Amino acid sequence: KRLAPANIESPSEFRSRYSADESSDAAYKKDLQNRRFQLGKKRALLVLIFVICTLVAGMVLRVYSFFNVTFGFKSKFITSSKQSVDLARKESFGFFTDLSVDEWMAMKDETKSVRDAQDALTAETSQILSQSGANIDSNAFWMNYWKVDLTCKNEMRIGGRWICDPKRVITLADEYNQFKKKSKQENDCLVYISGGNDLEFGNQFLDYSIARMMELHAGQATTGSLCEVHIFNPNAPEITVARDNLFIHPWGFRPTKKKKFMATGVDSISTATFKTLEETINDLRHSDNTISILALDCEGCEWDIYED
């Protein structure tokens, strides 16, 4: 109970804070509903503001992109976006041109995990071979050099060989060909093959490249494959192949550091001809081109040639 001040004669002049109606259950429920309604309005307003901001940001980005393409205008945001793709382009030597920094770093992390597992397996294998008395000096190459460079997510088997993303190889050649507007004689895709099922692989790769070009230019007339396939076989004479963009040359590869080269799997060593990669590139006038695929299967000569 509250006592009235001394200077006030009757406490009847004081009124309670809430009346009986205002303190009823019905009034409480009504007030609660009103509060919930106001809270819902605020949430709806926040969602509306977010949607409007997203639409405005999208429109602004489209305008910036339009001015960037049309007038060469560059904003900081667009420059930053371009730089995010440039890291993968630079570190993959132009092979991956559409990977963000996060995607590229994730691919590198996967590669590192594969390398760590491979190192552990190689060390264990070397220890077993050493305990057995085997000569493992020849395996130093595998320990130091033959490791995974990247974990390819789009590998494909063509002609009995695994290739990392051949679809990308043809796409890049097509984009470069259109950008430079080069003639058909200046191919943007070179494939060098030596050893193994070379002719089968060469034919199947050309078949695939033609199919890929038809896929890229659906409904349009295509000029065939943008790739040239060169097969190097020291056992074979110069052969004229009845197929466009497929060539067979009567020599094999030798390392630059060895003038006299003895390769296994060659029938007539004395009459066989070998050239270095640099000599081959110069003789075929490919010094201004990039070798897209180098496929070697020469019974161990890869160990000597890889440095070139």
Image (spheres, grey):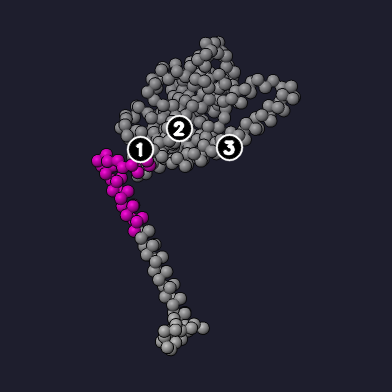
Q: Amino acid at mark 2?
A: Glu
* Vertical relation: 27 (above or below) 257: below
Q: Which residue is mark 3?
A: 113
Circle nearer the N terminus (3, 1): 3
Q: Residue at x 46, y 36 (%)?
A: 166
Callout 3: SS: helix
Left or right, residue 73 beside residue 54: left
Give the residue pinned by disc 1: 222
In the image, 249 versus 122, the foreground residue is: 122
User: Which mark is nearer the camera, 3 or 1?
Assistant: 3
Number of other residues with Cα within 10 Å of mark 2, as a class: few under 14, some 14 to 19, many 20 or more:
few
What label does residue 91 carry, if any?
A: 2
Question: What residue appears at the point 75 percent right and 24 percent down from the top-left corner?
Answer: 132
Read off the magenta span: 52-81
Three-letter code, disc 3: Ser
Mark 1: give few (<14), some (14-19) or many (20+) Cα within 10 Å: few
Count numbered badges in the picture: 3
**Could you tell me which secondary element the residue under label 1 belongs to?**
loop
The answer to whether the residues at label 2 and label 3 have Cβ atoms under 8 Å apart is: no
Report x, y in % for residue 114.
Answer: 58, 36
User: Furthest residue to the left?
Assistant: 71
- CA–CA distance in space, label 3 to label 1: 42 Å
Q: Main secondary structure of the magenta part?
A: helix
Asked if the residue under mark 1 is in contact with the one under mark 3, i.e. CB atoms within 8 Å, the reply is no
Q: Is residue 186 found left or right of 116 in the rendered image?
A: left
Q: Position of residue 118 (x, y in %)?
A: 62, 33
Seen at 25% across and 42% down, the residue is: 70
Q: Residue furthest right?
A: 132
Question: Could you tell me which secondary element the residue under label 2 belongs to?
Answer: helix
Residue 70 among magenta residues: yes
